[in-house]
Image (spheres, rainbow, N blue to C red):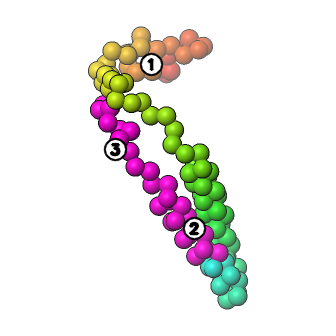
Amino acid sequence: MRTGSEPLEARSLLKTRRALALWGLIWSAAGVGIFLVAGLPGWAAGCAVVTVLAATDLAIVCRHIRQGPHYQPGKDIPPYEPDDGRNVRPGGGRGGGVGRDGDRGLG
C-alpha cells in the first residue's frame, strides 16, 4: 500500500547505473581488442555483444537522466486502498470469465 511519502523518500540509481554501464563498456571494448590480438575470435565476439548491450544501456540511462524527474503525487493525494478481493470478475477469480469467443478455457 502506498503511504504517501514515496516522493520524499525516492532515490534514483540512474547515476550509479550510468557508471556501471560505462565501466562495462570500457572493459568489454578492451576485451574485444585483447581477444582479437590473442587470436580468439569467439571470445572477441562475446565481448562485442556485451559492448553493444552496455552502449545501449548507457544511451538509455543518459536519456532518462536528461528527461529529469517525472510527476509524483504529493502529500495531498491519499494512499491507495488495498484491493481486498472486491474486483473479482464473474466466472470466478481475477481476470476469469468468458473469453471473446465464449470459451471459458476449461477444456
Marker disc for residue 9: 3
Q: Residue at x 32, y 26 (%)?
A: 79
Q: Position of residue 58 (x, y in %)?
A: 60, 59
- Side of 89 where 35 appears, left or right: right
Q: Earlier in the sequence, mark 1 or mark 2?
A: 2
Nearest to viewer (mark 3 / mark 1) = 3
Query: In the image, which is nearer the foreground, mark 3 or mark 2?
Result: 3
Q: Tell me if mark 3 has few (under 14), some (14-19) or many (20+) residues whose alpha carbon lies within 10 angstroms of its own.
A: few
Assign a secondary structure to mark 1.
Answer: loop
Amino acid type at mark 1: Gly
> x, y percentage for residue 83?
32, 22
Which residue position is annotated with label 2?
A: 22
User: Which mark is first along the chain, 1 or 3?
Assistant: 3
The stretch of residues the image draws in magenta is 1-29
Nearest the eye: 2 or 69: 69
How far apart are the two marked residues, 1 and 2, measured between alpha carbons? 46 Å
Question: Does residue 55 show up?
Answer: yes
Q: Amino acid at mark 3?
A: Glu
Picture quadrant where residue 100 is located: top right
Label 1: few (<14), some (14–19) or many (≥20) C-alpha neighbours in 10 Å: few
Residue drawn at x 64%, y 56% as measured from the top left: 59
Dot label at residue 96: 1
Most foreground residue, 14 or 33? 14
Q: Is 5 one of the magenta-colored residues?
A: yes
Q: Position of residue 86 (x, y in %)?
A: 33, 15
Task: Please tell me in which quadrant of the rendered image residue 43 appears.
Answer: bottom right
Q: Decide whether residue 58 is among the magenta residues.
A: no
Kind of residue at badge 2: Leu
Vertical comparison of 44 with 51: above or below: below
Q: Earlier in the sequence, mark 3 or mark 2?
A: 3
